[in-house]
Image (cartoon, helix red, strand yellow):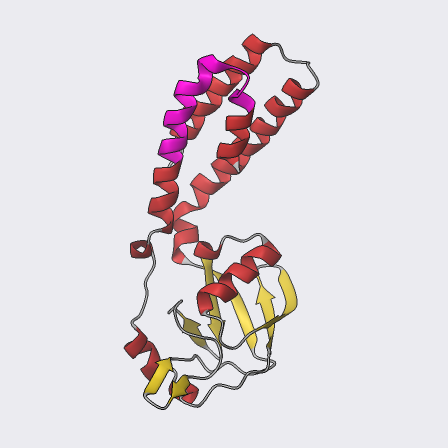
Amino acid sequence: PRRLRLLHLSSSYHNSQHSLHHTFHRMSQRQSISKSPGRRPTSSRQSSASSYTSADFIHTSSLLNLRIAGLDHHFDLSIEPTSTLAALKSEIERRTELPAEYLRLVARHKKLDDDSMVLGGTIMDETGIKEIGIGLENGTKILLLHSANYFNDKVGMEQLNTLNKEIDKVDAGRKDKSMDNKTVHELITQLCCKIDGVET
C-alpha cells in the first residue's frame, strides 16, 4: 500500500519518478527478505506427520469451526478441512489485518509450523496418503501469537507505519491544494529517503 500511495502521489510530478522507482525496488527487496521461507522455521511433511499422529484418519467434508483467540482478537472462523495452514493464516490476516508472515498458531499445545499441511484429517485414496492433515476438529481453539519474524522486524514495521501517516498528510495536501507542487515534490523526496533508511 505504501508503494502504491507514493506512486499515486508522484504521478503528477515527473521529477520524482526516478527516485521513487529506486525506492520501490528497495522496499520490494526488503519485503521479499522478510517474507522469505528462510526467515522462519518450517518442518517437513514427514516430521509434521510424526508430530500429529492423531491426524492419520480419512478426511470428512464438513466445515471446521475454529475458535481464534490471542493478540486482542477473539472470533470464530469456518473453513474447509482441506484448506492448508497457509490458507488459514491468510484468512486470519484478512480478519485481523495481522500479516500472515508474523503469525504463529498453536493448537492443543502444539505449534503449527508446516504451512502445507491441511487442517482436517489426512486425505487418503486407494494409492495411499495424498495430503497429511493436522487433525483439527470442530471447536478447536487456535491460539494466536507473534512469530519470531515479528520481533525481528517490529522496529522497522513501526517506522513504516509512521511513514504511512506522513504519506497520508502529503496525499491530503495534494488533494485539497494546501500544498503546492514544489512542496509535494520535496516531501516525496524526503519520504523516499526515510523509507530507504528503514531496516526490515
Residue 112 belongs to the span the image colors magenta: no
Is residue 95 visible in this depiction of the protein?
yes
Residue farthest front in this picture: 126
In depth, the one of 68 and 35 nearer the eye is 35
Is residue 200 visible in this depiction of the protein?
no
Q: Residue at x 65, y 67 (%)?
A: 75
Placement of the C terminus among the 4 image quadrants: top left
User: Across the whole image, how many numbered discs are drawn on residues?
Assistant: 0
Residue 97 pos. (x, y %): 57, 52
Q: Residue at x 42, y 71 (%)?
A: 112
Q: Which residues are magenta?
A: 9-27
In depth, the one of 108 and 169 nearer the eye is 169
By secondary structure, the bulk of the magenta-drawn segment is best described as helix
Q: Residue at x 43, y 39 (%)?
A: 156
Q: Residue at x 32, y 54 (%)?
A: 39
With 132 as the anchor, is 107 left or right in this view?
right
Residue 18 belongs to the span the image colors magenta: yes
With respect to residue 124, does 47 lie above or below? above
With 177 as the anchor, is 154 left or right in this view?
left
With 197 as the anchor, is 10 left or right in this view?
right
With respect to residue 97, does 131 lie above or below? below
With 161 as the anchor, is 127 left or right in this view?
left
Residue 147 pos. (x, y %): 43, 59
In depth, the one of 168 and 18 nearer the eye is 18
Residue 110 pos. (x, y %): 43, 76
